[in-house]
Image (tube, helix red, strand yellow):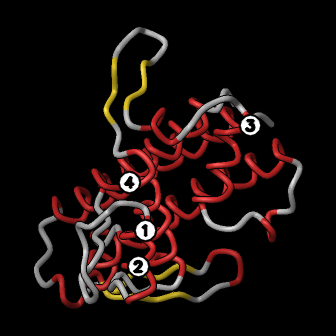
Amino acid sequence: MSFWKQWKDLTQHTEGVIIALGREREIWNGLKLDDPSNVVLTDRSRGRNYQTSLGEHLDAINDRSLLYGSILIHSYALCEATACDVLGIDSRDAGGVESWAGSLLTANGRSWENLDHFVDSRGHVEKFGGKAFLVEAAVARNCCAHKSMILDQRAVTRLNDSGNTAYSVGDEIGLDYDRLYEYRNILRTVMRVANI
């Protein structure tokens, strides 16, 4: 399956899940329940016996951090795996995004400067944060994978080395829908600029 087909599927999955979670929340919030604290949801499908309170269920669907983190991790992995395939390298030897994306750009006659501005197929100029923002997306991905959104010295040094000085040790790197979109956009742009 092509990179772009997989990217589209991941995008559709993301938006579909967000729509479904929103509809689920609307359904429960629209019900006139005498005592919502006594409502217990049960799922016995596929041999399971899962139970949760309505409050816990609503808390879970309102917290999108796991969804956004998962989508960012998968988006990054798709780009990295595709770059490794194109470059003919083992993903375990690819290094960070600074390495594999840099090699991918170079192999296609491009440079980091091509990520600062990109002219799309319609002639629109899009502004991106270049290498610094791409590295931020990679750091955010690592934070999601290791379930700590608080930046340590290693993460801040990596950001600083890329030219991103917006963060300090102990800062939280947030991930909401808009930031997820921006991180996926810079990842996608690397692939577009590299003619994938």
Task: Give the spatial CA distance, label 1 vs label 2.
Answer: 6 Å
The residue tagged 1 is: 161
Identify which amino acid the numbered label 2 is placed on.
Thr
Mark 1 and mark 2 in contact? Answer it, CB < 8 Å: yes
Q: Quadrant of residue 29?
A: bottom left
Compared to residue 4, the image places residue 98 above or below, namely: below
Identify which amino acid the numbered label 1 is placed on.
Asp
Task: Give the spatial CA distance, label 4 vs label 1.
Answer: 12 Å
Residue 133 disc label = 4
Of circles 2 and 4, the one toward us is 2
Q: Residues within 10 Å of mark 3 (few under 14, many from 20)?
A: few
Of circles 4 and 1, the one toward us is 1
Residue shown at 38%/89% (left/top)? 152
Labels 4 and 1: the sequence-earlier one = 4
Mark 3 and mark 2 in contact? Answer it, CB < 8 Å: no
Residue 185 disc label = none
Mark 4 and mark 1 in contact? Answer it, CB < 8 Å: no
Labels 4 and 3: the sequence-earlier one = 3
136 on left or right of 39: right
Q: Residues within 10 Å of mark 2 (few under 14, many from 20)?
A: some
Identify which amino acid the numbered label 4 is placed on.
Phe
What secondary structure is found at the residue carrying circle 2? helix
Labels 3 and 2: the sequence-earlier one = 3
